[in-house]
Image (spheres, rainbow, N blue to C red):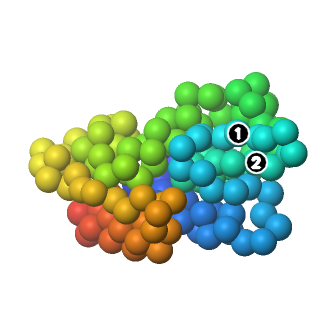
Amino acid sequence: MFPVEKPSEMIRFALVALNESEKFGSAVKPDMNTFHHMNESGVCFACLGGLYAIKRFNLNPKSYSKIEIRTSSGKTNDFVFGHEDILDSLRLGRVEEALSLAEIQFADAYKLDRVISDYAKDPDGFKSDMNLLARQLELLGY
């Protein structure tokens, strides 16, 4: 079934992954402008969706690629990247788009669209906004 969780659950799981990535010594560092990127010194960067995918599908952040996603997780690229796309839309406040990507029909979804604080400028505001969005989606059954 796609997605594996409700959008509210995806947000909460992604925020756990984000909090873990912020800790000293984490193998992955948050960067909301890239799904997954490794720099020359071996530091891995990932956005909220990338952090979610690495944790949820148990991917190796130091070496995963499109080929590895298929072999190590047993999931297809489209399946994994589909989850990333949903979270990318959510972190940008495009809730109607995210629900559509998650194949959820909700007539007034456009009313849920909002401004989400930029993680780079206000990490705590970003997390607060995302938690509020998760609560609102949960109240709607999503």
Is 82 situated above or below 114?
Answer: above
Q: Is residue 76 left or right of residue 63?
A: left
**Which of the 4 image quarters holds residue 133?**
bottom left
- Residue type at mark 2? Cys
Task: State the residue at coordinates (62%, 28%).
Answer: 77
Kindly identify which residue carries mark 1. Answer: 37
Res 118 quadrant in image: bottom left
Disc 1 residue crowd, few under 14, some 14–19, many 20+, Cα 10 Å = many
Q: Which residue is situated farthest in the front direction here?
A: 121
Q: Position of residue 130 (x, y in %)?
A: 40, 65
Q: Residue furthest top?
A: 67
Residue 44: percent from the left, percent from the top?
76, 48
* Amino acid, disc 1: His
Labelled pair 1, 2 in contact (Cβ < 8 Å): yes
Q: Residue at x 12, y 45 (%)?
A: 107
Q: Residue at x 37, y 49 (%)?
A: 92
Residue underneath mark 2:
44
Residue 75 is labelled as none
Q: Kindly tell me whether residue 1 is visible in this rendering.
A: no
For this orientation, the residue located farthest to the right is 41
Residue 70 point in image, percent of width and height:
72, 30
> At 59% from the left edge and 40% from the top edge, which residue is drawn?
35
